[in-house]
Amino acid sequence: MCMCEESQKFISFQEFLLCIYFMQPQIQHGGKMAEHRCRCIYRFYDRSCGGHLVFEDFLRMLSDIKKNKGQLVEREQLVTEAKKSAKLFGDHPQPQLTLDAFLETVGQLKFRGTSGLYRMHEKPWMVNLKRGRESPGY
């Protein structure tokens, strides 16, 4: 995972807090926060931290979108759909997807499904509190 602004292999504490903030379910995936969330999504899938998504990164994103929708994910179908979806990001296929192309295409609602990505559906600390209440005291 690479969430940092630069091509570093780590994030600062401030970036960590912002990442957690943007995962909150009440944060809208439109309007003012949309670009920030999309940048976080893009950085999350940029495994090389190179500032671009390669095809395998895009496949992983598409796979997660499908899983969020409860759809089965088969490699061959995923590759076919990824190639089709990649055409949305430019006039001709590119070997890598740039952040600008991603932001523009998602912002214009041409590529769908990203609103379900990078979401914390239940706060982990709340799950732990519930477990603590349900555990018998010893």
Image: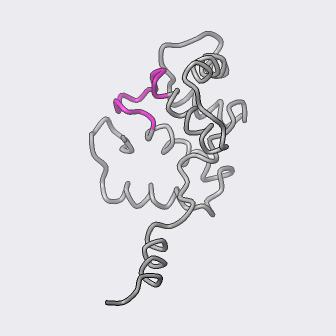
* x then y, percent, for residue 107: 67, 37
Dividing the picture into quarters, in which one does residue 76 lie? top right
Q: Which residue lies at the image location 55% right of the left edge and 48% below the top edge?
A: 37
Quadrant of the snapshot with the N terminus: top left
Dividing the picture into quarters, in which one does residue 8 lie? top left
Q: Residue furthest right?
A: 109
Is residue 82 shown left or right of residue 52? right
Q: Residue furthest left?
A: 9
* x then y, percent, for residue 98: 50, 25
Q: Which residue lies at the image location 54% right of the left edge and 29% below the top edge?
A: 100
Is residue 12 shown left or right of residue 30? left
Q: Nearer the viewer, residue 25 or 90?
A: 25
Is residue 8 positioned above or below 105 on the image? below
- Part of the protein shown in magenta: 45-57
Does residue 18 belong to the magenta stretch? Answer: no
Q: Which residue lies at the image location 72% right of the left edge and 34% below the top edge?
A: 108
* x then y, percent, for residue 125: 43, 72
